[in-house]
Amino acid sequence: MAVKIFIATDRLDSVLEKLSTKIDLLIPASLKDDKSAPTGFVPFVPGTAPAFDRQTTTPLKKALLPQVETLLRFEYHKDPQGSPKSSVTVDDQRQVRPTLVFGARPCDVKALTTLDRVFSNGPYVDPYYVERRKNTLFATLVCRQNDAKCFCTSVGGGPADMEGSHLRIVPVDGGYVVEALSPEAQTLLENLADAPDSARDAQAGQIVEEALKRRVGELDTKGSPEAFRKRFDQTDYWFQMINQCLGCGVCTYVCPTCYCFTITDEVENLKGERLRSWDSCMFYHYTLEASGHNPRPTKLERYRNRVGHKFSYIPERYEGLLGCCGCGRCIRSCPVSIDIRQVVGHLKENTSE
Ligand code: SF4
Ligand code: SF4
């Protein structure tokens, strides 16, 4: 039988502290002292209040694909005899500690299936991502705080979708019922807290039932790859959709399924670091070639690529998997209110010929 515990709200901090002696913990929390500040997943420190009541501003992908990470360090060695030949030593040690993300949302965990296809499958496996992925567990909240920008059930997810999760957290009266969904999670729950009483257990069951039935968003994505291809050359359509875009790139930085990156070397004297940093396909320089040619010279081509990537190229390449988890972050964060649901929703209009 699955192990379940009840964590009373006023004991959450001490239970998390105990849990953090077994495994490194990341929790959703405010990124500044101010409670209304943007939120993200941060290492647990006793006394930090988890922000379970809202979706984080920065996505969970940051835990597996950091915004900036050192891929390796290198050092050149000059030949003391003055020969023009020199040698270089490279250190690409990865130090990844087992980590539990406590309080992820189902959409964020779902988004990792897109990153998995890109970084873990196929001819180019990314050892940095794979190592973190193998060592990270997810305790996922049954979501009761979806808002008007969320559309997870339109893209194959749902507020109680536990695919990829190791523990389920159900907010109930006075606290949380936490249930192990995998053997390694079962071990984590041992001796942490008592089992829920029958009333709370029943309430948790009802909340899960209700969340499993709840529809979140009405976007119809059926046939979007074909509709996108038909729309591809209709510049009027794309211009009308994204005319007001500022090209700020926020939509890509907050998106849990975007994974564009750039690699740079930072060198001082004979030592250096190779860094990988998030980049954005919404930026002109992302696709600028050394020749000066740019295949996506305007925001029209760049935004069209962003939509095509998520609703046409990824599903065509990965057997129907959509490159969007419906978290709504790009809609909430866009300074000029561009709504990807409208762009995708209108793809199929008047394209029957
Ligand atoms: S495209 Fe927008 S709604 Fe879809 S996963 Fe990215 S941020 Fe979320
Ligand atoms: S957030 Fe909005 S304005 Fe900024 S690049 Fe994305 S679509 Fe354009």
Image (cartoon, grey):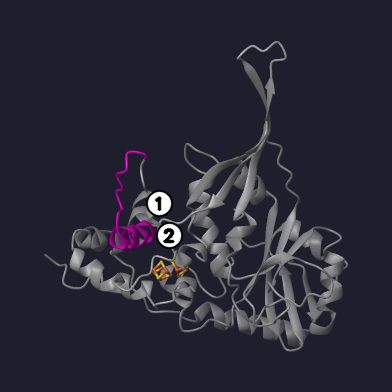
Mark 2 near ligand 1 (CB under 8 Å)? yes
Q: Looking at the figure, which quarter contains the N terminus?
A: bottom right
- Which of pointers 2 and 1 lies earlier in the amino acid sequence? 1
Using the rendered view, name the quadrant where residue 251 is placed.
bottom left
Amino acid type of the residue that numbered disc 2 sits on in the rendered structure:
Gly
**Position of 130 compared to 296: left or right?**
right
Provide residue 311's location: percent of width, then percent of height.
35, 61
**Position of 211 compared to 229: left or right?**
right
Q: Residue at x 64, y 18 (%)?
A: 86
Q: Look at the picture and state if 336 lies above or below 138.
A: below
CA–CA distance between discs 2 and 1? 23 Å
Q: Which mark is residue 37?
A: none
**Position of 103 compared to 22: left or right?**
left
Residue, disc 2 = 323
Write down the region rendered in magenta. 290-310
Secondary structure of the residue carrying tag 2 is loop
Using the rendered view, name the quadrant where residue 180 is placed.
bottom right
Q: Looking at the figure, which quarter contains the C terminus?
A: bottom left
Could you say which is closer to the camera, residue 227 or residue 264?
A: 264
Question: Does the segment drawn in magenta span residue 159?
Answer: no
| Outermost residue toward the left in this view | 353
**Position of 98 compared to 263: left or right?**
right
Q: Residues within 10 Å of mark 2 (few under 14, many from 20)?
A: many
Q: Look at the picture and state if 61 lies above or below 92.
A: below
Could you say which is closer to the camera, residue 148 or residue 233?
A: 233
Between tags 2 and 1, which lies in front? 1
| Residue 156 in view, yes or no | no
Provide residue 101's location: percent of width, then percent of height.
69, 63
Residue, disc 1 = 285
Amino acid type of the residue that numbered disc 1 sits on in the rendered structure:
His
